[in-house]
Image (cartoon, grey):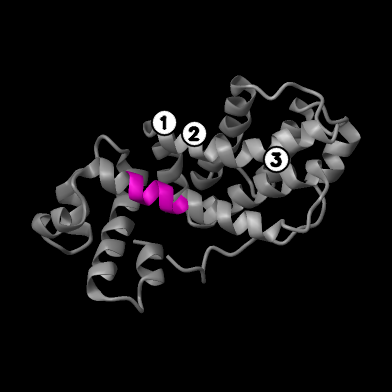
Amino acid sequence: MSGVFAARARSQGKKIRTRAGLMDAAAEAFARTGIEAASINAIAHAADVSNGTFYNHFRDKDEILAAVAFGIARDFAERIDEAMSDIEDSAQRVSFGTRQFIALATSEPTWGLALTRAVWALPELRREVETFARADLDRGVRDGTFRVEIDDLLVDLFMSMVLMAIYLRASGEANEDIGARVAEHQLRLLGVSPARARRASHCDWVPLSITGSSQ
């Protein structure tokens, strides 16, 4: 087990550490077998606790799924927003956000696979993830960078490209340059010229680290 949630809760009390261990076990189970096949018994066993302990922390599998998925998505979004606070160009913001989100998710494949499965299972999570992206899309329309109408279908397509890239990279079916390639296609979808889309999506950057933030 990767233990990312547990690592972040290491200095916390026993209750928080136990909850974090259950979340790590759930993320691994969801990634490995899928949400439907993952059982509470298997999650509890992997976390080395009883089923009763599981129910002390979560009502059911849906609740722990939401906790894991929202925890991952919010952590990534907050970290990326902070990292690109000084980026003004809308094309570069979209490229940076896409590349960082994919890189963060796939630097811990268990998280990436669990997140992609959860987004489709939890409509409220999908809407929240899309809200993060839509702010920069609307910004780009206002400043004239993007020459398309930002409607629900376009946002769905935009985010589907990110999620598919995460899945392919986390599954070992794509190289690490997939983030730049997806960002370039997204910018073309938004009406950015081929030359500008390529410059913005293939510029130098430093991936954020998944470690070291608080849970």
Q: Residue furthest front?
A: 142
Residue 119 in view (yes/no) = yes
Q: Give the main secondary structure, helix, strand or loop, of the magenta stretch.
A: helix
Q: Residues within 10 Å of mark 1 (few under 14, many from 20)?
A: few
Residue 186, above or below 88: above
Work out how far the residue at label 3 is from the one at label 2, CA to CA, in angstroms.
15 Å
- Residue 73 locus on image (x, y percent): 49, 49
Q: Is residue 62 left or right of residue 144?
A: left
Q: Residue furthest right?
A: 195
Kind of residue at badge 2: Arg
Q: Residues within 10 Å of mark 3 (few under 14, many from 20)?
A: some
Which residue is under mark 1?
Answer: 123
Residue in view at x 84 percent, y 34 percent = 145
The quarter of the image holding the C terminus is: bottom left
- Residue 126 locus on image (x, y percent): 47, 34
Residue in view at x 42 percent, y 34 percent = 124
Does residue 47 belong to the magenta stretch?
Answer: no
Residue in view at x 30 percent, y 38 percent = 35
SS of the residue at dot 3? helix
Residue range in magenta is 66-72
Q: Residue furthest bottom?
A: 11
Name the image quarter holding residue 178.
Answer: top right
The quarter of the image holding the N terminus is: bottom left
Kind of residue at badge 3: Asp
Q: Is residue 28 left or right of residue 58?
A: right
Q: Nearer the viewer, residue 66 or 51?
A: 66
Does residue 69 belong to the magenta stretch?
Answer: yes
